[in-house]
Image (spheres, rainbow, N blue to C red):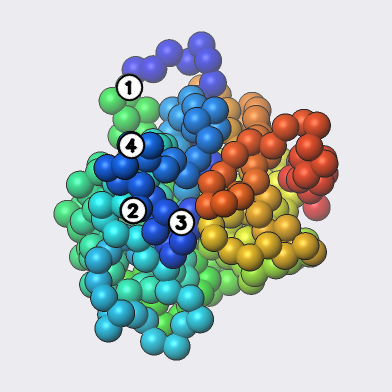
Amino acid sequence: MQSVARPFAISLLGDIMLGRLVGERIADGINQPTEFCWIEPALARFVEDADLVVGNLETAVTDADDEHKWPNKAFNFRISPAAFARAMQCLRINYVSLANNHALDFGLRGLTDTAATLDALKIHYGGVSHSFGSGYSDNDEERGIFLRRPDGVTILLLAATTHPADFAPAVRVLPPDMDELVADVERARRQPRGFRGPIVCSLHWSDNYLAAPTPEMTRLGRRLIDAGATIVHGHSAHHLLPYELYGDGVIFYAMGDFVDDYAVSERWRNDLGAVAKVQLDLRTNRVVGVETRMTRIADMRVSTLSHRDPDYTRSKRIFTAVRL
């Protein structure tokens, strides 16, 4: 078993959008003398200096052609399996949620290819039906995965999205109150022997571009912590929102995009994001610290903001612990 002398650390990332121009840039760099890396090395080291790295993957990993596109969508994101494998050489990620509004951008073929690629790279995933992929994610029950680490620590990861409804049942889509997810957390804690490890809920749970967390988001986040969740990993807004230390846990309402190729809104500054490294005391399953890095996307690459950069001050003012 892992020693409890130091906190157990989980790095959390926002929306990972490796499609379109980002994916093309990565693919173009394969086998070139100087290959393109989409993340600054110093930031990659900070992220990887953790026991677990969790993100929200919003890109189909597939070579499927356009005939497989989900109809009537404004944006369909895709990266080839070869380019995705190259991208993962720049950053180690242990788990991704696929419960979001881009999981089926290239239909069931795209989701099947995504799961197969993640299986091959030994990246755990959740938020989709277990009929996809070989089940590398070590699923113990239909709605979540118990990730068992070599050091003996086990983490329960649950993922869900509130939209779009027609992605169900391939993707776990729930009503905004997510009563079913709250019940999953309660069930895990109250089972005969009672799960005692960390529980992470990864939620794609809001509209794009919000001035503040909605009362419904705050209520749900707190319900999940009260039910026994340790971390609520919220995403979807495409820009930063505050986070909340609540009870023994933490609620992240939005962490911004980790990487994308979006045009930048001067109002929302969707090029600014954050990485959070949550530190847990495994003896009590309490959050004992949150270490952050402010980030910026430029030219399809994410890097750390210097404390002297005006954007750092802007981001830090938003992405800070509050009581809502």
The residue lying at 78 percent from left, 44 percent from top is: 311
- The picture quadrant where one finds residue 194 is top left
**Crowd band around label 4 with a 10 angstrom C-alpha radius: few (<14), some (14–19), many (20+):** few
In the displayed image of the protein, which residue is found farthest to the front?
Answer: 33
Does residue 173 lie above or below 50 as drawn? below
Q: Sequence-wise, which precedes: disc 4 or disc 2?
A: 2
The residue lying at 82 percent from left, 41 percent from top is: 310
The residue lying at 20 percent from left, 47 percent from top is: 120
Q: Sequence-wise, which precedes: disc 3 or disc 2?
A: 3
Inspect this view and state whether residue 277 appears: yes
Secondary structure at numbered mark 4: loop
Q: CA distance from mark 3 to mark 2?
A: 9 Å
Which of the two marks, 4 or 1, is nearer to us in this view? 4
Q: 19 and 157: which one is in front?
A: 19
> Mark 1 belongs to which amino acid?
Asp
Q: 278 and 48: which one is in front?
A: 48
Q: CA distance from mark 4 to mark 2?
A: 13 Å
Task: Give the x, y percent position of residue 207.
Answer: 64, 71
Does residue 265 lie above or below 86 as drawn? below
Q: Sequence-wise, which precedes: disc 4 or disc 1?
A: 4
Residue placed under numbered mark 2 in the picture: 27
In the displayed image of the protein, which residue is found farthest to the bottom?
Answer: 72
Does residue 107 lie above or below 293 as drawn? below
Secondary structure at numbered mark 2: helix
> Mark 3 belongs to which amino acid?
Val
Residue placed under numbered mark 1 in the picture: 151
Residue placed under numbered mark 3 in the picture: 22
- The picture quadrant where one finds residue 228 is top right
Q: Residue 192 bears which disc, if any?
A: none
Which of the two marks, 2 or 1, is nearer to us in this view? 2
